[in-house]
Amino acid sequence: MSESGGGARRGHDHDHDHGQEVTAGNERRMRFVFAFTAIYAVVQALGGWFSGSLALIADSGHMVSDAAALLLALIAYRVARRPADSTRTYGFHRVRVLAALANGGSLLLLVAWIVWEAIGRINAPHEVLAGPMLIVATIGLVVNLAGAWILSRGNKGDSNLKGAFLHVVGDLLGSVGAIAAAIGIMLTGWTLLDPILSVLVAGLVVRSAWSLVRDSLRVLLQAVPRGVDARKAEAELVELAEIDNAGHFHAWTLTDDTVVATVHVTPASGIDPLLLPDLVSKWLKARYDIDHVTVQVDRPGTLWTAEL
């Protein structure tokens, strides 16, 4: 953003560390859940092989993909911890947003695979050994409940942690569906329950996955955060007695819940231009909860000649 010449200009920011802190607690929770998921994926694969259950073997592949997603999230935490430098002044915090996007995308791919497999099994039913399936699925439910509980106690504003949590919830729902299918098959002998319940579980997962992808894309495309209207914010700034005009308001989410904004203003008659940066920053913080604001003060009549 270029500045108009001759006006009083002053950037205002609360500090130079624009990124949200990568908490050790979130990373530790992710490590525990990764270990649980990876170990159970092996247990489930062995159980599927022992019982001859293709459903369990397929779900073990699901768990392997989730373990890989959790590993990606852990790597993202490590990269995000690196400090900002002269070429990456915001640091590496958006790596967590990229990891969240990858997790959401992989969930959507997984849902597509589950639906494809379910259609195949409806057309050509497979024999399912309900007893071993019930035992392994119950173990999986316990493991996933523990993982979901551990992740739910972390920072709710961390999109990377949210992505991992959604993967675990997807596994949890899969375990519930497998238990229901196993019990149903034991009672009725109807093996089509397995693929039908798989599709129902996939429908529950896709909503959360799409929400994660959508929110991650909003951050990466630097869309205005939810609850902020750029034109309305400019109009409200002009209503302040100290400001004659306002324009070129831009706001975007840096990562998770850290919001950054820039705006041009011109002072009202008789107002000291040096007072405006602090005034505007405090007002935007109170009105829209924007953390970091850069304010450019232009001479009256020159604001609209500034380039975006």
Image (tube, rainbow, N blue to C red):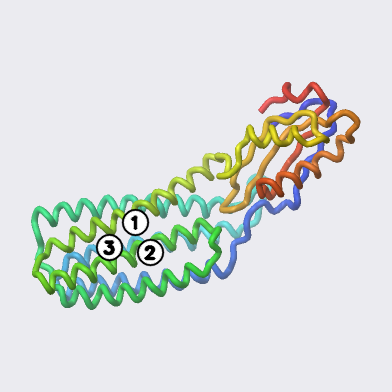
Q: Position of residue 157 (x, y in %)?
A: 55, 58
The kind of secondary structure element at disc 1 is: helix
Q: Position of residue 191 (x, y in %)?
A: 11, 65
Q: Which amino acid lies under the numbered mark 1 shown in the image of this protein?
A: Val
Q: Is residue 39 above or below residue 290?
A: below
N-terminal label among 1 and 2: 2
Instruction: Name the quadrant of the C terminus.
Output: top right
- Whole-angstrom CA distance, mark 3 to mark 2, is 16 Å
Name the residue that disc number 2 marks.
Answer: 169
Spatial separation of the CA atoms under disc 1 and disc 3: 16 Å
Q: Name the foreground residue: 141 vs 255.
A: 141
Q: CA distance from mark 1 to mark 2?
A: 8 Å
Along the viewing direction, whichever of 148 and 89 lies nearer the viewer: 148
Q: Which residue is mark 3?
A: 61
How dense is the environment of label 2, judged by Cα within 10 Å: few (below 14), some, or many (20 and up)? many
Which label's residue is closer to the chain start, 1 or 3?
Answer: 3
Tag shown at residue 71:
none
State the SS at label 2. helix
Amino acid type for the residue under numbered disc 2:
Val
Q: Please give left or right for residue 92 compared with residue 187 in the image.
A: right
Name the spot of residue 129 as percent of width and height, x first. Answer: 13, 73
Q: Which residue is mark 1?
A: 205
The answer to whether 303 is drawn above or below residue 167 in the figure is above
Which residue type does callout 3 highlight?
A: Gly
- In depth, the one of 287 and 218 nearer the eye is 287
